[in-house]
Amino acid sequence: MVAGRSVLEVASDAIDGGATAIQLRDKNVSTRTLVEEGRALRELTRKRGVLLIVNDHIDVALAIEADGAHVGQDDMPAELARKLLGPNRILGISAGSLDEAVAAIMAGADYLGVGPIYATRGKADAGEPVGLSLISEIARRYTTPLVAIGGITAENAGEVIQAGATGIAVITAVVNAEDVSLAAHQLARAITV
Ligand SMILES: Cc1ncc(COP(=O)(O)OP(=O)(O)O)c(N)n1
Ligand SMILES: Cc1nc(C(=O)O)sc1CCOP(=O)(O)O
Ligand SMILES: [Mg+2]
């Protein structure tokens, strides 16, 4: 459940609003439950033609035939994640510094999750905001797609894209919204150039 709504309902409404990828990120459930959520999301995302990425759990990503997985600096090492996922699934890797970005690109990241851009309530251990300059710095040097994350709203999403991000990843501004579909729509509009 997310803010009183099922994971499936939130994802479906977000897709209605324009989300092009859904990340299954649930820190508080058993692997069994994660697989159940993942299977339901796989069916939904296939039907709706959007990507499904599993956070942290490469085994679950493979088990539910997700499009890919996302790992951070404390998760499965990137090289092993790539090996386990194979060449065809999407591998996203978190980067909170230029050094981490370079290492992730060398390890075979298909995209980088760069953040936290702004202060966030979506991740307790996210650390201090890195700001837009890290996005610009990575974008100047590399062509790997950059997904900006952390404190992103419809109000600041435009400047994040202007700085060089390819896309945005959002929790609070979507899942806590009264109207999830409208919130996703406003975010999608804010990043449409
Ligand atoms: C798109 C995207 N970017 C970054 C993260 C964060 O991953 P991580 O640092 O492993 O932190 P947790 O999400 O696992 O708490 C992400 N999930 N997605
Ligand atoms: C899951 C996550 N990862 C981050 C990072 O910096 O890697 S920030 C974050 C939380 C994003 O939530 P919100 O959209 O509510 O700020
Ligand atoms: Mg992680």
Image: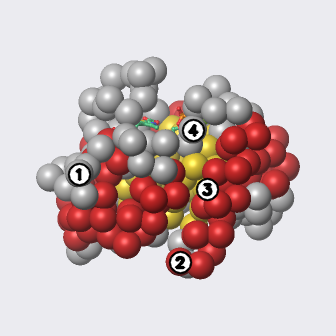
Residue type at mark 1 is Glu
Residue 178 is tagged as 1
Q: CA distance from mark 2 to mark 3?
A: 14 Å
x and y percentages locating residue 4 in the rendered image: 39, 42
First reached walking from the N terminus: tag 4 or tag 2: 4
Question: CA separation, marks 4 and 2?
Answer: 22 Å
Q: Secondary structure at mark 4?
A: loop
User: How dense is the environment of label 1, judged by Cα within 10 Å: few (below 14), some, or many (20 and up)?
Assistant: few
Name which of mark 2 and mark 3 comes first in the sequence: 2
Q: Secondary structure at mark 3?
A: strand
Q: Amino acid at mark 4?
A: Asp
| Residue 30 at x, y percent in the picture | 70, 32
Amino acid type at image mark 3: Ile
Disc number lying in front (2 or 3): 2
Disc 3 within 8 angstroms of ligand 1 (CB):
yes
Query: SS class of the residue under badge 1?
Result: loop
- Mark closer to the observer (1, 4): 1
Alpha-carbon neighbours of circle 4 within 10 Å: few (<14), some, or many (≥20)? some
- Of residues 60 and 80, which is closer to you in this image? 60
Can you see residue 105? no
What residue would you read off at disc 4?
Answer: 26
Question: If you read the primary sequence from the N terminus, does the residue marked by circle 1 or circle 2 appear first?
Answer: 2
The residue beneath circle 2 is 48
